[in-house]
């Protein structure tokens, strides 16, 4: 069976997977599949799971918080902030859920800090404005 190369890239690592026969991902239009010698394609993947098969073996699961997919010249490039790769769907799904919850908590904390900083800046500007004589 024909195959292609999958190049996974995140912020700290690159993983090259050879002999991929099938890839299934999801963008905003829904699920789609890629086989060897597919036409050129570029799309943004949504948060969730993708999967691929190596040389007619079992599926490998890929959890990611969205990403950019580009297929060209029988190479599938997938760039994302972070990815998890495993044979066990349940395990990888739990990792993705944990990661998303942790990122959501960090974002919530950052928003609170920015709100407090903005509030303090407005208080100081208000005090300075009251002290200025016209």
Image (cartoon, rainbow, N blue to C red):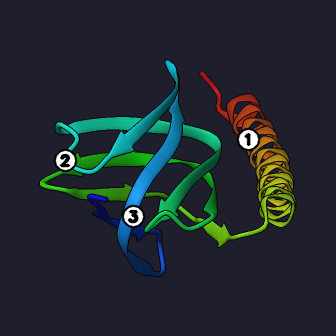
Dividing the picture into quarters, in which one does residue 26 lie? top right
Q: Residues within 10 Å of mark 3 (few under 14, many from 20)?
A: many
Q: Does residue 30 lie above or below 49 as drawn? A: above
- Disc 2 secondary structure class: loop
Percent coordinates x, y for residue 85 in the rendering: 63, 70
Could you say where residue 62 lies in the image, as x and y percent from the top left?
61, 59
Up the image or down, 17 lies above or below 2; here it is below
**Left-right relation of 25 to 87:** left
Q: Residue at x 86, y 53 (%)?
A: 101
Mark 2 neighbour class, 10 Å CA radius: few under 14, some 14 to 19, many 20 or more:
some
Q: Are marks 2 and 3 in contact (CB under 8 Å)?
A: no
Identify the image quadrant of the N terminus: bottom left
Q: Could you say which is closer to the camera, residue 107 or residue 3?
A: 3
Q: Position of residue 122 (x, y in %)?
A: 74, 35
User: Residue visible at 42% across and 67% down?
Assistant: 8
Residue of label 3:
20
* Disc 1 target residue: 118
Question: Alpha-carbon distance for marks 2 and 3?
Answer: 12 Å
């Amino acid at each position: 069976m024909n195959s292609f190369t999958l190049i996974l890239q995140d912020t700290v690592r690159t993983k090259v997977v050879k002999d991929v026969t099938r890839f299934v991902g999801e963008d905003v239009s829904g699920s789609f599949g890629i086989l060897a010698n597919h036409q050129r394609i570029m799309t943004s993947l949504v948060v969730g799971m993708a999967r691929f098969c190596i040389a007619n073996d079992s599926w490998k699961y890929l959890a990611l918080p969205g990403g950019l997919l580009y297929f060209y010249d029988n190479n599938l490039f997938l760039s994302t902030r972070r990815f998890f790769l495993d044979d066990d769907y349940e395990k990888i799904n739990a990792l993705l859920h944990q990661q998303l919850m942790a990122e959501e908590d960090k974002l919530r904390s950052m928003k609170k800090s920015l709100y407090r900083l903005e509030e303090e800046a407005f208080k100081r500007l208000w005090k300075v404005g009251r002290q200025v004589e016209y």
